[in-house]
Amino acid sequence: MAAVSQLTDLAPSLSPRRRAQGARAAAVVAALAGGFLAAGLGLGFLAVLVLLLWITSPYPDSGPGGALHVVADLWLLAHGADLVRTETRTGVPAPVGLTPLLLTALPVFLLHRTARDALTPQDGRARLAPLVTGAWLACGYLAVAAAVTGYALAGPLYAAPLRTAVVVPLTVAAATAAGVWSAAGTPVVLLPRRRRPAAASAAAPVAAPADARAGAAPRAEGAARAAAAGVVALLGGGALLCAVALVMHAAAAQEHFLSLSATVSGRFGVFLLAVALLPNAAVWAAAYGLGPGFAVGAGSAVTPLGAADYPVQPVFPLLAAVPGEGPGGPLTWAAAAVPVAAGIVVGCFAGRAAAPLPGEREQSWRWWPTVGVTALAALGCGAGTAALAWLAGGPLGTETLADFGPVWWRAGGAAVAWTAVVGVPVALAVRAVRLRGAEPLPAPPPAARRATVAPSRGRRWRWGRQGWPLWEPRSRLAEEWEEDQGGG
């Protein structure tokens, strides 16, 4: 026993390098497991929902395998993949690419939350770099996505492999990057002033010169906040406009809802689909208020000025609320208030950023930076609107069903125009109101003709006799400065 104990005591222990390698390997495995778990939770939620509808249906169309194929198809559709329906009347495969945005929120939330939790500091656990952790987490998630794509190919409704290989990794990367960004520390420019760390506030200069006053309230912050507020205002106005349209066409929407299914489970499924498409309807209504409108079939357009080439619509409650009246109707006037309200919101946010302290002119911007920030916010609002319009549309079949939703570049351009035209005067007016009664700024003192410390090599700048800056040794300059002080 003594010999065994001596051999154990003399056995080499793990080096710090090997312990670090083992900790990093464990962190990689944990990140991969987090990706697997996020994908599994999304699939599990959809599986419970679809299987519940399948079990309660009195006349199921297929067995459990068909229900699981529907789960896989819905999960891939939530990531932006286009589905292909092979069982059609004409025999020609029909694409299904209209993604319910509320369904997309599920994988985005799970990926964001998993990435943020994976980077949260924990005692006794090694941590990788934020980007490395996000990359391994995305790899685990994409491995599940590849398996689900292969499984869904055997069904009558499958995901288009080429688009799935492009769109799903982009969605996963964007959601994971948002989670990593949130865990690593949101940039100070996007945090409210009352929630900013003290270090960031202390780093700001106490007093700024007259030509740097615009930097006291960062222009990037003002533009970002105003643009985000404008997009939220457009979506809120679109949701309100959609609700008004549903109330005005309640009888037709109820008739469509009851005609789609005669069973409780079938009507519950139609209700869930309509709820998942409500964010899409809000984006469509916002595009309608902006002016370009949206398409409800190939070659059609529904705008406040009327509907052109209006095709026969599928039976669905939300499509029953599509306005068909011409210009001058109550819905047309209500639609005009949506972009005006968005422009007012952008202008109010930009004006408050231009004059953060009422009655204090030293921390305010001049009028031209206010106009520039408002214009930049209008561009940001247009970019956000264009992205949402692109996500909210897609095909539902072939021929007349090949085009649904707004045209993204038209909706984005109209958002830029509306928010810029309305927002700039509102921003200037808000700035003027907040600076009412403020004392004028004092004139800046004349430039002192004294030496300032040079950044290197022991030399200093000084002003010569004719007003030209001279570069001289420190000793000579110090002597001249002392002579000026003594002579004064």
Image (cartoon, helix red, strand yellow):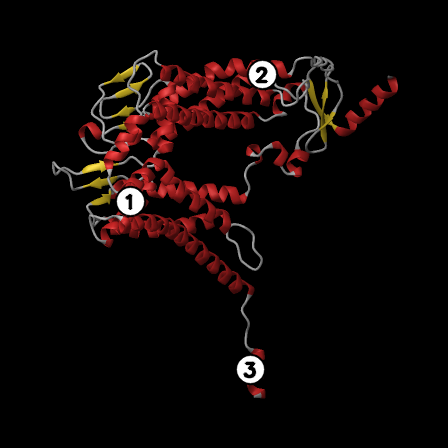
Identity of the amino acid at label 1? Ser
Q: Nearer the viewer, mark 1 or mark 2?
A: 1
Say which residue appears at 33% left-offset and 35% top-offset.
274
Disc 2 or 3, which lies upstream in sequence? Answer: 3
Q: Which residue is mark 1?
A: 265
Measured as percent of width and height from the top left, residue 276 is found at 35, 37
Alpha carbon of mark 1 to alpha carbon of mark 3: how far? 71 Å
Residue positioned 24% across, 42% down in the render: 160
Q: Of circles 2 and 3, which is in front? A: 2
From the viewer's perspective, tell me whether residue 279 is left or right of residue 226: left
State left or right for residue 186 relative to residue 277.
Answer: right
Q: Earlier in the sequence, mark 1 or mark 2?
A: 1
For the C terminus, the quadrant is top right
Q: Earlier in the sequence, mark 1 or mark 3?
A: 3
> What is the x, y in percent for residue 435?
65, 15
Nearer to us in this view, 254 or 245: 254
Q: Is residue 169 visible?
A: yes
Residue that mark 3 sits on = 7
Instruction: Say which quarter of the image contains residue 418.
Output: top left
As drawn, the label of residue 430 is 2
Q: What's the amino acid at mark 3? A: Leu
Q: Residue furthest right?
A: 486
Q: In whole angstroms, how far apart are the C-alphas of marks 1 and 2?
A: 53 Å
Q: Which-is-in-front pick, marks 1 and 3?
A: 1
Residue 426 point in image, percent of width and height: 53, 15
